[in-house]
Amino acid sequence: MWAIIKKEVKTYFLSPVGYVFIGAFLLMSSFFFYIYTYSMGSVEYSSLFYYTSELLTFTIALLTMGAFAAERKNGTETLLLTSSRSITGIVIGKFLAALVVIIITEIFSLMYYIILCIFAGEIVGITKTITTLLGFILLTMSYISFGLFISSLTENQIIAGVATIVLLIVSWFLPNLSEGLYILSPISLFQKFPEGIIGIKETIILLMQTGMFTILTILALQRRKNLK
């Protein structure tokens, strides 16, 4: 699995994908930081992630759309599926590689928190900061697993990317249709964390979503392997 993670992380940073993702995220984070901190005088780091979580819906597809779709299109999927590595190891390896990019992005984003602390003259909102970062990772894990699943269903990266974005946007509005659909909306499940609350229910559901889509991805690839 380590070989898969290493290979995928290198792929992200030997191509523009990793840099575009991190750059786009930090660019928009800077915009929100300017609006809510400089213009409005807020010293809430958690509010920054509250708004950039919506941006994640659009950018996560950059990391996931080519994970399996590109392998199929380039004809390397057969080599991947018939290698000595297990399909489970391949899927989890790609998942963790995308998560590494997210963690790197979060580390870079801490510069805003440092600026806030300097601006306020003290350490501010440490509890909210920790819960927000935790919630953001959980949200990202759910999004990555979903994006990988969509990528495993097609050989067209554009279709995978667009489908991921559209379906994640649709999930925003599900709670408006019915309160019971709240559990199908990752971004709604995330909203407690910037408030400094680690929702046990929300945490469990986000982890279950991650596990479910990871398993579905493994099953989709296993089925294709059996058909070859």
Image (tube, rainbow, N blue to C red):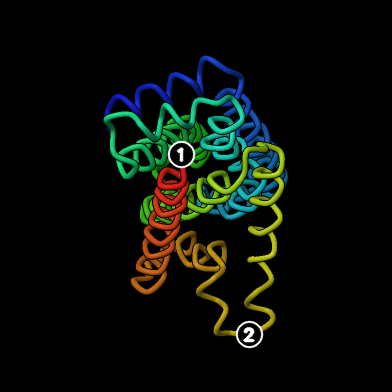
Categorize mark 2 by other alpha carbons within 10 Å: few (<14), some (14-19), many (20+).
Answer: few
Residue 132 seen in render: no
Q: Is residue 23 above or below residue 172?
A: above
At label 1, counting other C-alpha atoms closer than 10 Å, the crowd grade (few under 14, some 14-19, many 20 or more) is some
Q: Which of marks 2 and 1 is nearer the N terminus?
A: 1
Three-letter residue code for mark 2: Ser
Which residue is nearer to you in this view: 91 or 108? 91
Query: Helix or strand or loop: what does disc 2 sit on?
Result: loop
As drawn, is 45 to the left or to the right of 84? right
Q: Is residue 130 left or right of residue 14?
A: left
Name the kind of residue labelled 1 in the image: Cys
Q: In which quarter of the image is residue 5?
A: top left
Q: Which label was assigned to residue 117?
A: 1
Asked if residue 38 shows in the view, the reply is yes
Camera-near label (2 vs 1) is: 2
Q: Which residue is drawn at 36% across and 56% down?
A: 127
Q: Based on the displayed image, in which of its 4 quarters is residue 66 positioned?
A: top right
- The percent position of residue 12, horizontal first and vertical second, equals 51, 24
The residue lying furthest to the top in this view is: 14
Q: Residue at x 42, y 26 (%)?
A: 79
Residue 28: which quarter of the image? top right
Mark 1 element type: helix
Quadrant in which the N terminus appears:
top left
- The residue indicated by pointer 2 is 178
